Image: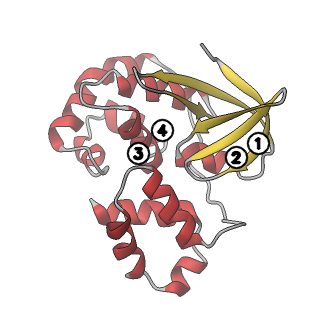
Amino acid sequence: MFAYLKGQITLKTPTYIHVECNGVGYHVNISLYTYSKLENIDNVKILTYLHVKEDEQSLFGFFENEERSLFIHLLSVSGIGVNTARVILSYMNPEEIKTAIIHENDFALSKVKGIGPKTAKRIILDLKEKVMKESGDSPLVTSFESKVHSVKSEALSALMALGFPKPAIEKYLKAIPEAQTDTMPVEDLIKLILKQMN
């Protein structure tokens, strides 16, 4: 239904953005990978995927077509929904995911929160041929700095939006020294927490 949105970003968080197009504001769910690409961008052309359920419609945005393609491929795997697909794309960048699938590295995929060994093997079995047919490289994720909220509060909000319980997140955040988190990009902190929660 929507191929892309082109307009001004009026709100930017690690898990979603608001894009204003001709006076209409769209709530667009994003991964940490796309968020890192939008660090210094205010006007954007964001590729989209509309997820429709009986009781809701959700719009997902992607900075690059490669990420959107992987997202759609992941949804075709039994047991993987939009939230799990977004967690995978937040934990690994598109190039890392493609490499893991092509080289049948189920261990790397199973390190993602919510992906067990069986699901990791299913991802590889279902997607290896599709991924190998597609070409194109993605640059590695770049780091970014939180400019409005503290790094910890930004990470807490992002992880809660991804479906993780607040008490568990706070437990891991408290274990990390303030001196470390104050100088750490929020994306790196979120990835660190995801690894510890696994």
- Which of pointers 1 and 2 lies earlier in the amino acid sequence? 1
Which residue matches tag 4?
95
Query: Which residue is at 71% across, 26% downward?
Result: 5
Q: Secondary structure at mark 2?
A: loop
Question: In the rendered view, would you say 172 is above or below 106?
Answer: below
Circle 1/circle 2 CB separation < 8 Å: yes
Task: Mark 3 vs mark 1: give the one in front.
Answer: 1
Which of the pair 160/95 is nearer the observer?
160
> Counting residues from the N terminus, which is met first, the one under dot 3 or under dot 4?
3
The Cα–Cα distance between marks 3 and 4, rounded to whole angstroms, is 15 Å
- The tag on residue 87 is 3
Q: Is residue 122 left or right of residue 190?
A: left
- Disc 3: CA contacts within 10 A as few (<14), some (14-19) or many (>=20): many
Please tell me whether mark 1 or mark 4 is closer to you in this view. Answer: 1
What kind of residue is marked 1? Ile
What separation in Å lies between label 1 and label 4 (alpha carbons)?
26 Å
Which residue is found at the position 32% from the left and 23% from the top?
A: 127
Between label 1 and label 2, give the one nearer the viewer. Answer: 1
What type is the residue that disc 2 sits on?
Leu
Point out residue 158 in the picture as x, y percentages from the top left corner: 50, 56
Q: Looking at the picture, which amino acid does disc 3 mark? A: Val
Q: Earlier in the sequence, mark 2 or mark 4?
A: 2
Position of residue 104 measured from the top left corner of the image (x, y, whole percent): 26, 35
Which residue has dot 2 on it? 38
Residue 46, relative to residue 12: is it above or below? above
